[in-house]
Amino acid sequence: MLRGVRLDGNFLRRQRAQNGMSQKMLAEAAGISERTVRNAEKGMVVEVHIASYLSTLFDVPLGDMVVERLQEQRSKWLEKWARKFSRAFVSSWNGGPCDDMLALMHPSVEWRCNTMPKLDIDGSFAGVSAIIEWLSHRHCQKNSELLEIRNEKTEGIEGEGDILYFVLSADWIINPGEAHQAWITFLCRFEDDLVIKIEQFNGLSR
């Protein structure tokens, strides 16, 4: 998967000068920071969409600006994504902010949750606001309350292309001092680098 590109800084600088633009003007036109422009002109790595926009802005082929394309295997990237998502998911359950997790999602993400009999959480949601609503519902059967998730592990990660499957196992603290071994499986589909559909299955070990 193409993760970033290294631009020809001298070429970019000449294009900017020929168009009568300062670094500040180019940054404003491209919707990026001046620091990003400076880094690009120094030959540092930039994201692909930034390089693509600059080539369109200056009306030059992208290949003329790029001196190196950085590659990363999709499966490796998905493994990193799964671990990052797991950390953010557990943090949100334990009362932390949802921002890190929401940053990994498409704005119109569909998140469907299916549970085993011991849990009483169920729903189908679309959109960020509904996910936040779902995260606020932390109740199990018989008026028990899920207080905290501890000792989490991300296991069984398998992914390629736009599909990812993994298991998040952990100790769920239900009511003071009552711990249960629990697992959550996630089946995810991506659009570009953001998850657009999640199938979640929860279960508590007996």
Image: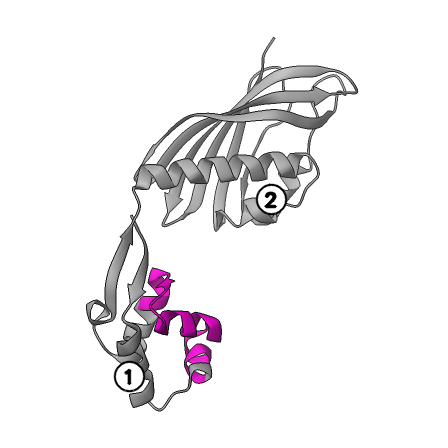
CA gap, disc 2 to disc 1?
A: 48 Å
Q: For the C terminus, give its image quadrant.
A: top right
106 over 61 or under it: above or below: above
Residue 190 place in picture, x, y as percent = 38, 43
- The residue sitting at the front extreme is 42
- The residue sitting at the top extreme is 206
Would residue 50 be counted in the magenta stretch? yes
152 over 125 or under it: above or below: above
Left or right of 66? Residue 84 is right
Residue 10 place in picture, x, y as percent = 28, 77
What residue do we see at 36% from left, 50% from top? 192
Left or right of 174? Residue 17 is left
Q: Which of the 4 image quarters holds residue 13?
A: bottom left
Q: Which of the 4 image quarters holds residue 116?
A: top right
Neighbour class for label 1 at 10 Å: few (<14), some, many (≥20)? Answer: few
Q: Nearer the viewer, residue 142 or 55?
A: 55
Task: Please state which amino acid type lies under the numbered disc 1.
Answer: Arg
Task: Please state which amino acid type lies under the numbered disc 2.
Answer: Ala
> Quick one: SS at disc 2?
helix
Region of the chain picked out in magenta, as a range: 25-51
153 over 100 or under it: above or below: above
What residue is disc 2 on?
130
Q: Main secondary structure of the magenta part?
A: helix
The numbered disc on residue 14 is 1
